[in-house]
Amino acid sequence: MGLFDQFRSIFAKASTPATPAPAPEVKVAALEDRRTRSRVNPREGTRILLIDDSPTIVTALKRILRSAGCVTLEALDAESGLELAQNQHPELIFLDIVLPGMNGFAALRALRKDPMTKDIPVIMISGNEQATEQFFGTRIGADDFMKKPFSRFEVFARIERLLDENQIPRRPKTASIPQPSQPAVAMQQA
């Protein structure tokens, strides 16, 4: 069989219509659980900072959060968001990764270095697949991640994971930035 015949047989197989894949199973139990279990909202008046360069995303998050009694602060870039975080002391921050000027990763590093903002829980958001991969690779101190587009249910599910017994968002103890152990520091200084 010649090279031409090999290509023809390969393409003939590729052009043959395949049997349709079975429809994916709907996780009925998860849907029923979501509908029957009452949602735990943050306490009334929780201050949440939204940092995203898309006015559409900011408006959507603002409507979702305000419907649950939250107070929102909005910034369209990281620099304004950092200033609001320092001056207004929000209890939770939604931070986009891809921003004009300073990106979300640099903003998160600045938040974690500042004693005034280091303990504020941060949920990073992005629609950029590469940014998602970079987030999981760097692990620089975000408390959760939410991919765009998101649903109302997902917004509240992310917040609910961070609520303490008083319905106040808190950083999980495991989310703190790892510190080097003493022996490693001593060896670096030697």
Image (tube, rainbow, N blue to C red):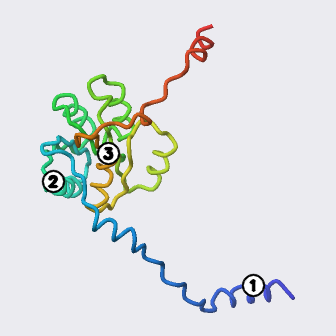
Question: Is residue 160 found left or right of 69 in the rendered image?
Answer: right
The answer to whether mark 2 and mark 3 are in CB contact below 8 A is no
Residue 86 found in image quarter: top left
* Residue placed under numbered mark 3 in the picture: 99
**Reading the chain from its start, which is encountered first: label 2 or label 3?**
2
Select label 2 or label 1 by which is in front. 2
Select label 2 or label 3 by which is in front. 2
Question: Where does residue 59 sit, x and y in percent of width and height?
Answer: 17, 55
Q: What is the three-letter code of the residue carrying label 2?
A: Ala
Q: What is the three-letter code of the residue carrying label 3?
A: Leu
Residue 2 found in image quarter: bottom right
Other residues around mark 1 within 10 Å, as few (<14) / some (14–19) / many (≥20): few
Q: What is the three-letter code of the residue carrying label 1?
A: Phe
Q: Secondary structure at mark 1?
A: helix
* Residue placed under numbered mark 1 in the picture: 7
Question: Is residue 174 found left or right of 169 in the rendered image?
Answer: right
